[in-house]
Amino acid sequence: MAYYKEFATAAGTLVCAVGIGFVMQSSDTAESRYGTDKAAEPQVAVQAPASLVDTSALDGPVLDVHDIVLTSALNDDAGTRDTVVALAPADTLVTPDTTDVAPGQSCTVNATAKPSGLGLVDLTVTAPCFANERLTVHHSGMRFTETTDATGALDLSMPVLADPAVIVVAFANGDGAVAQTAVPSLGDFDRVVLQWKGDAGFQIHAREFGADYGTQGDIWAESPGDPVQAISGEGGFLMRLGDQSASEAMVADIYTYPSGASRHAGVVDLSAEVEVSLFNCGLEIEAQSLELRDSEIMTRNLDMTVPGCDTIGSFLVLNNLIQDLTVAQK
């Protein structure tokens, strides 16, 4: 199916560290992308100026964690100690009330992590005094919001960007914990993260080796692929992390491709896109991309204004926010 990307100058505002342009496609084009017979309407394209994003919106309470021992880096003679400083979320949540804690019950927050293959880590958080409470997970610039269960526990699987992986969890009152683990399989994977806050409407599309939108090789949140394919080198997969039911939640799309064991050669077309909706039309939105390529992390920041509510149903295709992935067959 046809899917066109053209550049021109039109009304709109977008600010990015690399001078990102975006293409606005009509709702009819979106229908064409996903298999209807309706022809695509003409597109409106926007060219944006280059500038640095204002990161003041990321300011917030700081969880200062000291004396972390990176166990995978230890030798027989001496250990390596680092200090991790992570931003806790700036929000208006009420500090959890622990005055009714049962005698003998500890309010200590604990976090553990262990590798699970595919460059993933199983993260477990126990926080008996923080039942049904919001927390933020931080790792190597990646961050997302989750919510504990009725016992104050959280269990999830997450892609990581560094080996060893240091993961910080922080509650709204500043309480938190740190988990760390070696991730020996990480070097076999390329990984791309797109993260944002609230109902901004962002999404990653990874069209593998010539796949068109809506086909099997189009990997995105509603068609995330199969991690089993990554084990065999057949294809990539996407995970969306973040409790989107939480107010102003931080959310992340993470696409992973097994470049170290790929059975295919060619290009994975990667794009960051925004669907214009009732929740974001006419508003300022922000996002950040992180790309793990050859064990190095590249970061880009984005600040843009979504077109007005008369364009609901259209898609904005953000050019060059994330780079296409070139894969060699192994």
Image: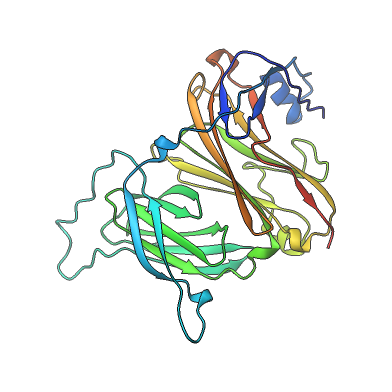
Above or below — where is 139 with respect to 92? below
Residue at left offset 63%, top offset 22%: 314
Above or below — where is 276 with respect to 149? above
Residue at left offset 46%, top offset 47%: 144
Q: Quadrant of the C terminus?
A: bottom right
| Residue 248, quarter of picture | top left
Which residue lies most toward the bottom here? Answer: 76
| Residue 85, quarter of picture | bottom left
Q: Residue 160 placed where, x, y %? A: 56, 58
Q: Nearer the viewer, residue 195 or 148?
A: 195
| Residue 120, quarter of picture | bottom right
Q: Residue 186 placed where, x, y %? A: 63, 64
Residue at left offset 66%, top offset 26%: 21
Q: Residue 3 placed where, x, y %? A: 78, 28
Q: Quadrant of the N terminus?
A: top right
User: In screen coordinates, is 295 left or right of 2?
Assistant: left
User: In screen coordinates, is 306 left or right of 262?
Assistant: left
Let me know if residue 245 appears in the view: yes
Let me know if residue 248 appears in the view: no
Q: Residue 189 placed where, x, y %? A: 68, 59
Above or below — where is 21 with respect to 151? above
